[in-house]
């Protein structure tokens, strides 16, 4: 059983309703990777308990995990390749020619990099759709980040099932 105490940290509180606030001088109690309680530092001062790892949170703020609600994680490898160009140039002359050469392994490498960057920035969950989603899923599982993945396809007429939908509905 792993126990951790982050002592004397400010905590961003995000209530279901009302305004966010920062509660200073809080202790975050974690057991087996899960937050069990958050208490004012004065309550547990000097009583971490045996076998508890203590981290000094002085001067730091703990925030809830962030969610990246729209990403194409492997495209992190294309960053800087098509800046300050029209959308037509970006898609047709820059990005799509690079995407043609993406193998499943290259997608996985890009997704691994993106997962690492997101975790370092406080992102704990991301929503993604891109080619080779299985490779993105593997990268997410490997890193421990949560992911909501959707399949990707291209067609000038849409998927066969979409033709059966009522567009006025």
Image (cartoon, rainbow, N blue to C red):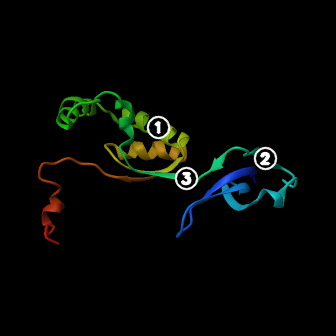
Pointers 3 and 1 in contact (CB under 8 A)?
Answer: no
Position of residue 109 relative to residue 146, above or below, is above
Binning the other alpha carbons within 10 Å of mark 3 as few (below 14), some (14 to 19) or many (20 upward) gives: few
Q: Of the two numbered discs 2 and 1 on the same chain, state the one appearing first in sequence.
A: 2
Residue occupied by mark 2: 54
Of the pair 141 and 68, the residue shown nearer to us? 68
Of the pair 63 and 32, the residue shown nearer to us? 63
Residue furthest out toward the top: 81
Residue occupied by mark 3: 65
The image quarter containing residue 22 is bottom right
- Residue 114 in the image, given as x and y percentages of width and height: 45, 38
How far apart marks 2 and 3 lie (CA) works out to: 21 Å
- Residue 13 in the image, given as x and y percentages of width and height: 60, 60
User: What residue sits 31% from the left and 43% below the top?
Assistant: 131
User: What residue sits 36% from the left and 31% below the top?
Assistant: 79
Residue occupied by mark 1: 112
Binning the other alpha carbons within 10 Å of mark 1 as few (below 14), some (14 to 19) or many (20 upward) gives: many
How far apart marks 2 and 1 lie (CA) works out to: 30 Å
The image quarter containing residue 47 is bottom right
User: What residue sits 67% from the left and 45% below the top?
Assistant: 60
How far apart marks 3 and 1 lie (CA) works out to: 19 Å
Position of residue 77 relative to residue 137, above or below, is above
Q: Of the two numbered discs 3 and 1 on the same chain, state the one appearing first in sequence.
A: 3
- What kind of element bears circle 2? strand
The image quarter containing residue 85 is top left
């Amino acid at each position: 059983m792993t126990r951790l105490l982050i002592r004397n940290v400010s905590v961003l509180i995000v209530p279901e309703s009302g305004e966010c606030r920062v509660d200073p001088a809080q202790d975050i109690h974690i057991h087996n990777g899960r937050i069990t309680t958050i208490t004012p530092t004065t309550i547990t001062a000097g009583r971490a308990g045996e076998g508890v790892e203590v981290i000094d949170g002085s001067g730091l703020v703990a925030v809830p995990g962030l969610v990246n609600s729209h990403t194409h994680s492997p495209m992190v490898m294309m960053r800087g390749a098509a800046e300050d160009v029209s959308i037509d140039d970006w898609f047709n002359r820059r990005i799509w020619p690079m995407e043609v050469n993406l193998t499943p392994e290259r997608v996985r490498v890009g997704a691994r990099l993106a997962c690492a960057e997101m975790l370092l920035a406080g992102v704990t969950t991301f929503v993604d759709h891109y080619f080779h989603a299985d490779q993105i899923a593997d990268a997410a599982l490997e890193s421990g980040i949560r992911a909501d993945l959707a399949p990707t396809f291209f067609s000038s007429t849409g998927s066969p099932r979409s033709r059966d939908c009522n567009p006025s509905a």
